[in-house]
Amino acid sequence: MKKIVVAGGGHGGIGVASLLASRGYDVTVYERRAENKMGYDWTDIFAPGAFAHIEMPMPDQSLYSYKENMTFYGPSFHTGIRQNIPKDKLEIKMERRDIYAHIIKCAKKNGAKFVFECDVSGPIVLGNRVVGIHTARGDVYADLVIDACGMDSPVKNGLPSVCGVNPDTGKNNQFYVYRAFYNRASEEDVADKYKVCLFAERKLGIGWVATEDSCTDLLIGRFEPFDLEEAERTANYYRKTNPSLGTELQRGGQFVKIPVRQPLSKLVCDGYAAIGDAAYMTVPIIGSGIANSFKAAGMLCETIENDVQGAYSADTLWGYQVRYYRALGAGFAMLACVKEALTVFTPDELDFLFDSGVLTSSDLSIDADTTDLLKIFKGNNLQSVKTKVFSVVKDKALLKKIMAVSKKIAAVTSVCAAMPKKYAAGPVEKWVRSYEKVINMRLV
Ligand SMILES: Cc1cc2nc3c(=O)[nH]c(=O)nc-3n(C[C@H](O)[C@H](O)[C@H](O)COP(=O)(O)OP(=O)(O)OC[C@H]3O[C@@H](n4cnc5c(N)ncnc54)[C@H](O)[C@@H]3O)c2cc1C
């Protein structure tokens, strides 16, 4: 029987382990944390339909609630634009530890094996084929290694260049985040329970203040690392306009990173496939990655099943990349351009987009199922498009930046469409070079 190892217990890795085990494959997940320490001490938001992609039932209803619509603010807090996602389309909010407990239980039931508290230090490579992983408990050989070790995966980072998988995350492509839950300091009713602030204090970054019944959830995100002192100073800044945000830390209080970029240019090589944050599968403008990792797990499982000889070569695994890019990846590559635009807009320009009516509630009604730009702008009628165009053309500097982003989006769209449908080393390498060249085009 073919042996498959999953390096790291990322969401997509556990999802694909479960799917494969249910189909009779011998699959083992090697995870650094203890089983009861999986995940983080916080809640996540994702589409409830996500579990269906890994053929798992919904968790017990007592374990999740529905998220609030968010209200977005520009740097000066002049204008709040509230999302308008209908109730039946809202995502669910669930403790990350409960998500992990649920998917691990289902995966085990399907026959997936787990080795917890086992650090993976890198790939074992023979020639240009990945044949296993080095772990703290010894080397493990396998016919296929699925990399679900997250953004800084030592498996991905240890691949020799001959494998063609580029592990460089790149500048402005990771979001440094401080997330903490404080006591709810005021009982006053809060109109906007979930405030998302772009460039607060005119600093490049995003933050949120989400008022819950008994606590207030604070997230501070920047494109550069920062320390606890800066996090506390920023929390005090938010406290001035958010009386619900108390000073008593109840839980969380960690620094973490989220990838916010286009998907990996090459997800597979001989004996290897990347999934989840290891392959940068988050929605680049909001950092949601759980549902996408589950979707990718379904695609990877099907590709593996189609490889009836069990070659698990770049050739037979390429179908996974093609399916992923067609369904999600190409759209995320476009959204990565929009995220990049945020890094070149000035706070004044961003304020203008909020205050002048260019951005509307429908543009900001994005969720984890927002996979491309068309979904974002679908709510715009001719009149609102005219308003946007007339507002923007008045500001030459802003118009120039928007034109540059549009040009880049067009180039990214066409390079994604040109991805080879069938694997051949030369054309794939050529495509990877063109994709990375377009992605690296500077906006200003
Ligand atoms: C603050 C924050 C909030 C987020 N909120 C949301 C949200 O609301 N909704 C949403 O959809 N997404 C959210 N995300 C993103 C989401 O966490 C990821 O996109 C998603 O979990 C997919 O990543 P992953 O599971 O592949 O990787 P990770 O979450 O990084 O998991 C990797 C796993 O591999 C293990 N591992 C790492 N290195 C090793 C090693 N060397 N050896 C063995 N094991 C190893 C880790 O312990 C971990 O279990 C958030 C992320 C952050 C940081």
Image: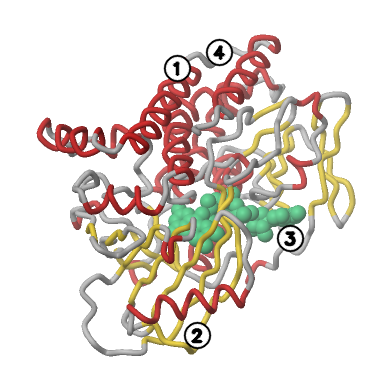
- Residue linked to disc 3: 32
**Three-letter amino acid code at the position of disc 3:** Arg
**Image coords of residue 431 (percent x, y):** 60, 16
Q: Percent from the top left, x then y, of residue 224?
A: 61, 57
Side of 79 where 419 appears, left or right: right
For ligand 1, the image quadrant comes to: bottom right
Q: CA distance from mark 2 to mark 1?
A: 48 Å
Mark 2 crowd level (few <14, some 14–19, many ≥20, 10 Å Cα): some
Any atom of ligand 1 within 8 Å of the CB at mark 1?
no
The span from disc 1 to disc 3 (Cα, nearest Å) is: 40 Å
Q: Which residue is mark 2?
A: 250
Which residue shows up at 45% across the image and 28% down it? 330
Labels 2, 1: front one: 1
Q: Position of residue 130 (x, y in %)?
A: 80, 32
Q: Residue at x 64, y 27 (%)?
A: 266
Left or right of 362? Residue 440 is: right
2 or 3: mark nearer the eye: 2
Sequence-earlier tag: 3 or 4? 3
Q: Residue sitting at 81 percent across and 40 percent down?
A: 158
Residue type of the residue flagged with mark 2: Gln
Crowd around label 4: few <14 · some 14–19 · many ≥20 (10 Å): some
Q: Which of the two labelled residues, at mark 2 and mark 1, occupies the earlier sequence position? A: 2
Name which quarter of the figure residue 177 lies in: bottom right
310 or 138: nearer the viewer: 138
Q: Is residue 292 left or right of residue 28?
A: left
Residue 68's place in the image compared with 159, above or below, is below
Tell me if label 1 and label 3 are in contact, CB under 8 Å.
no
From the image, tell me which residue sits under label 4: 420
